[in-house]
Image (spheres, grey):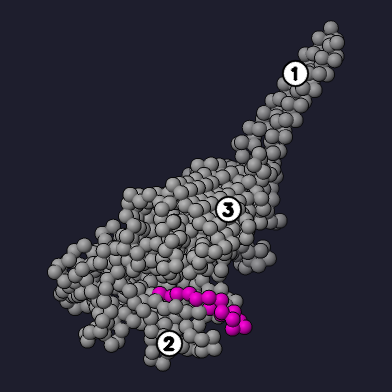
């Protein structure tokens, strides 16, 4: 009986030990970023971070549950939809249950799901951060069912003229689409046509249902649509498609600067839609405001023959805080065979702050021209950073933006086979209040003969405008503005006028410094620099330190900066194979090590050689090196892989400069050795071991060190971090269980023998 009991207890104890072991192996095997679950409703994919969300790519009929708030800024978009908007998931169908969590941090012009094949998004909050973004781009597969349930849209979004038809929930919706308790509180501003609930326009053979949806924000658009952004295909609602609205409410404000807001969709609205418009409106209880914005009196603008623009304020009006002048043009996109892809819009803009006492405001834009040719010399980044201006045979125009273009398409201002086709744009002036809210557009556009001379001043990238000399008799409107490289338009107050000033900012030298990510384990020796190294090298290259730079190199740098050339300073950190180290440097290190040999019993090994240098390039061509920083040392770091961090081992850095080898002061923490240096040549990472410890490194370079304290800072030789305490604890638990098992078995066996 005792034997059976012994076996039974021993079996239980062994099982417990195996369980603990299995838990430990599971900890080793589990990937914290891998999706957990099988994707069914009873065992959903569990998502707690943005990288896991992107792993839903290609999943069909999947069930997903968020277990934490998701910050999309923590992951990278893998591609673009329509060559325009970044997506985080390209293809997906199924359910995403937010479980009350929020999704935020979406990049500008981005969507969570590019192609939604059907399913449901529910119980989540989508938080906008000012830039155009949406949950779904395409959600209109024929006969598919789309449910958006208990979704909150918060924050704010400012659209540009390139973002027409867009909306934060779903941009293209069709099939059988139902919105239930979709609550939008986001503030929306747009110079074009957008909507509150669904983007674009109704598709054929589709059904749309809105139940208990609300809007409580402040929306000001040129052409506001409440349900859809566009009424171009609203005739579908009179034929093959249906729209049902019930229990919805508007407690916020929806204003149209150009047109009255429409429920079905304001752009291309036709009186044939009146009955369907009235039916849709009846589904909303409006306690807020849905109206055309009141016209702004006492403000007007005129244009001269050169296309410049002047805004005039009468009677000391003070309800406007700033103007935005927007020049825009429609252009066409074609497939390679010449068939049309569609129409797009490009724009360039200037922001002009209103100043006390000023009655006239001049803009450099007005009716500008755009350009779609391949020749011409780009001379500015464009006043809004989106378009480049070019000079072609003395003629200036704005180039169609290329940042988001699809390389498979051809973009033209005119017909498909027309080259270098210039075209005058339209211009709109928007007015904003002190809170940055769009009030309305300014009426005008009539011709007036006036002169505008745009003066030019020069400075350097990164300079505050307050440090730049304004034109005679003028003061900067926004002295805190920081200049970017290239040409930009800044505004100055001159008497009772606010005038544009062209500011040319030369490029600031670029400093490239490798930085070690201490949160990522390394498998081989890595080299980097501390965060303040970049600032130090900027001062060096500006000539503000006593670093040794030859007069010829300093003159080359100064000339390049003055010419607007790109100067790059690179801290190069290269690992060097033993056979490539200069013989003289190897001899110096060996002599230094030999001098350290004594009776301490330590064994030294060179684990890796390095070459540190500071290289100066102009337009990517090397023009020189800086080898001595004198009194401006930089802090370098070496990350040591775990396999080198054995018990009892410490590390140091030996430098050879002008034939002299020395052990530098250094500290080791979390597997990273940190040291300062002001000279650049050959370095060696060396390890110190007890005489009976396991050693590695380069053959032939081991030696015994008696006393290295004279060459190192106090506390510089420290033990490495060699393990994970969590894993140690688990293994300790296993050992404890096994020990307990042995004790129990011994006692039981003794009793059985007695």
| Residue 753 or residue 694, whichever sits in front | 753
The N terminus lies in quadrant? top right
Please say whether residue 742 is one of the residues in the magenta stretch: no
Label 1, on which residue?
Answer: 743
The magenta segment is: 333-347
For residue 102, above or below residue 21: below
Label 3, on which residue?
Answer: 146
The C terminus lies in quadrant? top right
Residue drawn 39% across the image and 79% down it: 380
Q: Is residue 549 left or right of residue 116?
A: left
Q: Is residue 104 left or right of residue 734?
A: left
* Contact check, label 1 and label 2, Cβ < 8 Å: no
For residue 316, above or below residue 414: above
Label 2, on which residue?
Answer: 422
Looking at the picture, how far across and down is residue 271, in whole percent? 41, 68
Residue drawn 27% across the image and 71% down it: 442
Residue drawn 51% across the image and 89% down it: 418
Whole-angstrom CA distance, mark 2 to mark 3, is 44 Å
Please say whether residue 335 is one of the residues in the magenta stretch: yes
Front tag of 2 and 3: 3
Most common SS among magenta residues: strand
For residue 356, what is the image quadrant? bottom left
Residue drawn 42% across the image and 82% down it: 370
Looking at the picture, how far across and down is residue 31, in whole percent? 65, 46
């Amino acid at each position: 009986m005792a034997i059976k009991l012994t076996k039974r207890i021993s079996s239980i104890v062994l099982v417990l030990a195996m369980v603990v072991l299995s838990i430990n192996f599971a900890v080793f095997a589990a990937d914290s970023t891998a999706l957990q679950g099988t994707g069914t409703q009873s065992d959903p994919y569990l998502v707690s971070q943005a990288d896991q969300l992107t792993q839903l790519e290609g999943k069909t009929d999947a069930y997903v549950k968020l277990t934490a708030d998701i910050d999309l800024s923590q992951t990278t978009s893998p591609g673009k939809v329509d060559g325009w908007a970044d997506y985080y998931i390209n293809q997906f169908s199924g359910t995403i249950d937010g479980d009350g969590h929020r999704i935020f941090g979406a990049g500008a012009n981005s969507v969570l799901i590019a192609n939604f094949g059907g399913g449901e998004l529910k119980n989540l909050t989508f938080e906008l951060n000012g830039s155009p973004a949406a949950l779904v781009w395409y959600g209109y597969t024929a006969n598919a069912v789309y449910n958006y349930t208990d979704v909150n849209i918060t924050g704010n979004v400012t659209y540009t003229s390139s973002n027409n038809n867009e909306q934060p929930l779903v941009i293209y919706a069709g099939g059988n689409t139902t919105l239930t308790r979709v609550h939008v509180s986001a503030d929306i501003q747009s110079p074009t046509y957008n909507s509150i609930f669904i983007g674009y326009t109704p598709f054929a053979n589709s059904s749309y249902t809105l139940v208990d949806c609300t809007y409580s924000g402040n929306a000001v658009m040129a052409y506001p649509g409440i349900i859809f952004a566009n009424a171009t295909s609203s005739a579908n609602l009179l034929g093959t498609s249906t729209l049902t609205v019930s229990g919805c409410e508007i407690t916020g404000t929806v204003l149209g600067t150009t047109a009255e807001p429409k429920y079905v969709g304001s752009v291309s609205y036709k009186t044939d839609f009146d009955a369907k418009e009235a039916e849709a409106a009846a589904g909303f209880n409006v306690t807020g405001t849905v109206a055309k914005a009141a016209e702004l009196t006492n403000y007007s603008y005129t244009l001269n023959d050169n296309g410049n623009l002047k805004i005039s304020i009468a009677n000391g009006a003070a309800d406007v805080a700033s103007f935005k002048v927007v020049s825009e043009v429609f252009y066409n996109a074609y497939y390679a065979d010449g068939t049309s892809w569609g129409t797009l819009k490009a724009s360039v803009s200037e922001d002009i702050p209103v100043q006390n006492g000023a009655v006239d405001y001049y803009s450099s834009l007005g009716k500008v021209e755009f350009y779609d040719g391949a020749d011409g010399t780009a001379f500015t980044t464009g006043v809004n950073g989106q378009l480049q201006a070019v000079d072609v045979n003395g003629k200036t125009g704005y180039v169609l933006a290329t940042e988001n273009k699809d390389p498979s398409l051809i973009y033209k201002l005119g017909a498909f086979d027309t080259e270098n086709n210039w075209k005058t744009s339209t211009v709109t002036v928007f007015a904003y209040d002190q809170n940055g809210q769009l009030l309305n557009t300014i009426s005008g556009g009539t011709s007036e003969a006036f002169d505008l001379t745009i003066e030019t001043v020069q400075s350097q990238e990164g300079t505050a405008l307050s440090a730049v000399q304004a034109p005679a008799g003028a003061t900067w409107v926004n002295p805190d503005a920081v200049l970017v490289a290239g040409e930009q338009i800044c505004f100055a107050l001159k008497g009772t006028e606010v005038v544009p000033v062209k500011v040319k900012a030369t490029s600031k030298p670029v400093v490239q410094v490798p930085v070690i990510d201490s949160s990522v384990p390394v498998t081989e020796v890595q080299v980097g620099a501390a965060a303040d190294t970049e600032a130090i090298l900027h001062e060096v290259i500006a000539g503000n330190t006593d670093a040794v730079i030859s007069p010829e190199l300093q003159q080359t740098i100064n000339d390049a900066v003055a010419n607007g050339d790109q100067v790059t300073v690179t801290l190069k950190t290269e690992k060097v194979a033993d056979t490539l180290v200069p013989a003289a440097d190897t001899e110096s290190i060996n002599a230094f090590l030999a001098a350290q040999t004594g009776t301490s019993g330590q064994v030294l090994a060179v684990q890796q050689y390095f070459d540190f240098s500071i290289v100066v390039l102009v337009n990517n061509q090397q023009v020189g090196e800086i080898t001595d920083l004198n009194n401006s040392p930089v802090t370098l770091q070496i990350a040591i892989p775990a396999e080198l961090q054995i018990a009892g081992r410490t590390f140091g850095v030996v430098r050879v400069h002008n034939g002299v080898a020395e052990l530098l002061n250094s500290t080791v923490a979390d597997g990273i050795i940190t040291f300062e240096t002001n000279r650049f040549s050959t370095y060696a990472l060396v390890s110190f071991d007890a005489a009976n410890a396991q050693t590695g490194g380069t053959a032939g370079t081991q030696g015994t060190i008696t006393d290295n304290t004279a060459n190192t800072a106090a506390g510089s030789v420290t033990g490495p971090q060699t393990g994970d305490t969590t894993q140690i604890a688990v293994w300790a638990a296993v050992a404890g269980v096994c020990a307990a098992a042995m004790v129990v078995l011994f006692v039981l066996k003794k009793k059985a023998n007695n």
